[in-house]
Amino acid sequence: MGQFFENTVFILRKLATDRTAAVGAFIIMALIVVAIAAPVLSTHPQDVTEFNPPERLQGPSMDHFFGTDRMGSDVYSRLLFGARITIAIAVIAIGVSVLIGVPVGLIAGYYRNWVSDALMRVSDIFLAVPQIVLAIAIAQTLGPSIENVILALSATYWPFWARLVYAETRSALNETYVEASIALGASPWRVMLLHVLPNISSSLIVRTTIGMGGTILTAAALGFLGLGPPAPSPEWGRTIAESREFLPEAWWYATAPGLAIFLVVMGFNLLGDGLRDILDPRTRRSSDG
Amino acid sequence: MNAPETDLLVLDNLRKYFPILNAWKRRTGWLKALDDVSLTVRKGEILGVVGESGCGKSTLGKTVMGIHPPSGGRIVFEGNDITDLKPHQSRELRRDLQYTYQDPGASLDPRWKIGKSLDEPLVIHTDLNRAARQQRVREILAAVNLPESHLDLYPHEISGGQQRRVGLARILTLQPSLVVLDEPTSGLDVSVQATILKLFLDLQKQFDLTYVFISHDLSVVRMICDRVAVMYLGKVVELGATDQVFDSPRHPYTQSLLAAIPQIGKQRITEAFWLEGEPPDPGNLPSGCRFRTRCPQATDACAADIPPLLDRPDGHADACLFSE
Amino acid sequence: MDDLLRVTDLEVGFRTDRGLARVLDHVNFSIGRGEIVGLVGESGCGKTTLARSILGVLPANSAVISSGSIDFDGQNLLAEDPGDLATDVRGRQITFVPQDPFSSFNPVFTIGAQIDELMKWKSPDAPPGGGLRRYARTRRRADRERVMDLLRTVQLPDPEGILKKFPHEVSGGQRQRLMIAMALLPDPQLIIADEPTTALDVTIQAQILKLLKRLATERDVSVLFTTHDLGTAYEICDRITVMYAGQEVESAPSDEFFAAPRHPYTTRLLHSLPSRERGIQGIPGQIPGLIDPPTGCRFHPRCDHATEACRTARPETADIGPAHSLRCFHPVELSQEATA
């Protein structure tokens, strides 16, 4: 536990010195704060479920920072609540993918037998179909809802983690310290969980961070195609889809969620790149002074 | 199976062939890294295994350790045949039979503090509680002359020589009876090498160890080994007490190997070295004696059969047709 | 001075995350014409940095040269235009034999193609000042002739065949012979060989040392030979300079160096060599870090002879015999050495 704390402090300190990573981290922090504090920060929290047709399609003003939409709801407030959906989808979908992909990759990477081959062929099959097509097919079949978007995304994303962990495990097994542990008599589980996994965790974290961005994009695409949570959900992709018929006059309507998606995806990518540099174990010290 | 009491490890015609694969993963030949190697390691001795890269000395160590499964022959350790053990059986065996890597420092997990790395063998092999394990870890750290404060450092925070000490300490925590040292001094500066060698000897006395000392550095081998086996392309070509081998080498390969070592104050090899050519491709060995392509004494007889390693009356064995 | 190369008061540091690493501390060093000089020391002593400074290939973004000069054949290399150095000096008058001959070849071209490329720019017949001039057929023919000649001289079997091979198809010993041939092809005045035999087996090392010594002597080329192995230095060098933690401490003709060393570090280093007579002796303590090195003589924390003077200032270079120079306040007495 002490070590975990130490590592966290270490990473945060390094983050502060790396400008691009700090920008990424700031954007993501902001996203999380916004999602949690949406009811407080929003100017018209009731607009997520209630409509106000007389005020429809008004431009940005002091009352409506990003204008209003086709139902007269405040775009800004809906955007804040949309962040909650985005985070929920991304975190759960990635979480499930990691939970499936990492054990599959570890086992397939550690053993060199038919189980390993079988696991990797299954993930190959998933990877052979373009991801968005597979996600659309799954979401289409199951019907539009948040749960189904998460399911579709998890089903299409886990093979990436399986592949990554598989490749990293194979190369970690060639490291002397892993071979030495095996020679010492360590059991396969011990080697996988205590030596291999911690040492590949940095690339895993980097990949997961960047994967978050990708997942948010795909989720938005599904929402845009009407396969995401149904109306009146403030999901960003759905909002952009709704705004299409009012372009270019109601430019604020599409711009606000578009910018939000852009910023969040960029934030995850910047953070991921920064973490890649920071997490190199050889730069770490036991007592960073 | 009933080896005499003093023979700790017996290798009987041990073979390790690696398949040579072409671009389509079809086998096109065998790389005979170990070919009918028979050796005995006596309890309490330091047996040196010397030779140049590709001679099979590292394969020898790894095959004994079970890292490579042997292709033929037998390995008998403490009277038990350990040639074909199941994985869990060989894990048990590791307590008594340990292996150090060329760079024992590299055998430390970069994300683990030294203390945790030293604790690991005890966690795996013993039922000791935390306090007892920590006691053992501190003892072993003291035995390799490192301060206790090192327990809280990461491997990259200590010097290469200290990493080696830690690597060595790690395998000694289990108090093995035989340790295979694979090139333990390569890449070390001489001043550090000296302290490491001293440490090997101290630990040997302290823990009653037997070493198989694999090295390409003949001057080090001469310093610390009791007996020496000289290998060339998968074969032991000469075996005897260190003094016998170094003072009166019988095999022409051993002679050339010794002649190649720079000796300060003696005749310079740049004036006197006579061996020409390079070792043949290990995947495509010459018939008969494998050294005959470079040997100045080679005759037709050398090409006919592989000369066996013959024990001479003085206990100094060699595999040359022309030695006494 | 008839020295081919003279390094005076050279100070080089590397910028790191934790501050400036003082890798070379006001180093004096020289090589005579046709002389083979060994630069000996343990890892981190600065021998490779010194070799690279002479070659002019220090990493530009981190290396800081704060004082000193490198005079080579009448010109100060540190003052010259880097472009001129690249075309006319480096690779022509000063050539390089690396430690690892494998990574020095480009794996996707044949050895012949790489030697041709070298000769196009660096052959002794190539016009000075570089410039993208035509590679005339007559010159190309003369160069080919020269290449074949030299490949035979370095005793490569089947030189024509080897030119058609790729780097991975020849053995380590042959690659090092090729590197030596390539270093000699431009007819240089100085070859910098950076641990050229460390990666080789002893019998191959013996062959390569023999070859390098013979060629350097025959062609009257000076060689700067860096090594951590005193044995190889004994084999090949006319004179040996020892470095410790970025400071040169002693320089002496080879025989005298081994028979009558005067600096405490030199004697301890020689005693660390495995030997039956002396047993095993190391040097207590550790090599210091270069970010915050000891003041004065950097060896003083590990030295039996150290006094207050050693801690405050670094001794000046003193000549104590023909070609034998020393930087120590308390040299080891010869009688003491004999009994040690």
Image: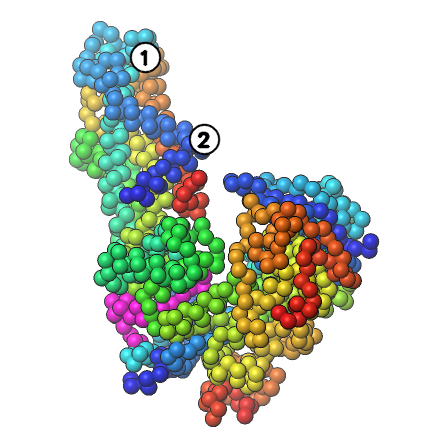
Measured as percent of width and height from the top left, residue C227 is found at 62, 61
Q: Give the labeled residue for mark 2.
A: A19
Residue B260 sits inside the magenta stretch: no
Q: Nearer the viewer, residue A230 or A208?
A: A208
Q: Is residue C143 visible?
A: no
In this rendering, would C20 be left or right of B153? right
Q: Amino acid at mark 2?
A: Arg
What span is in magenta? B82-105
Q: Position of residue C32 (x, y in %)?
A: 77, 58
Between tags 2 and 1, which lies in front? Answer: 2
Left or right: residue C109 versus residue B18 is right
Q: Nearer the viewer, residue C119 or C205?
A: C205
Q: Which residue is mark 1?
A: A65
Residue B25 in view here: yes
Check the image and name the residue furthest to the front.
C308
**Is A98 on the left-hand or right-hand side of C224?**
left
**Chain identifier of the residue bearing label 1 in the image:** A
- Among the 4 quarters of the image, the one containing residue C322: bottom right
Task: Name the residue nearer the viewer: A1 or B14.
Answer: A1
Q: Is residue B313 placed above or below A110 in the rendered structure?
A: below
| Vertical order, C106 against C158 (above or below) | above
Q: Earlier in the sequence, mark 2 or mark 1?
A: 2
Which quadrant of the figure contains the C terminus of chain B?
Answer: bottom right
Q: Position of residue B14 (x, y in %)?
A: 38, 79
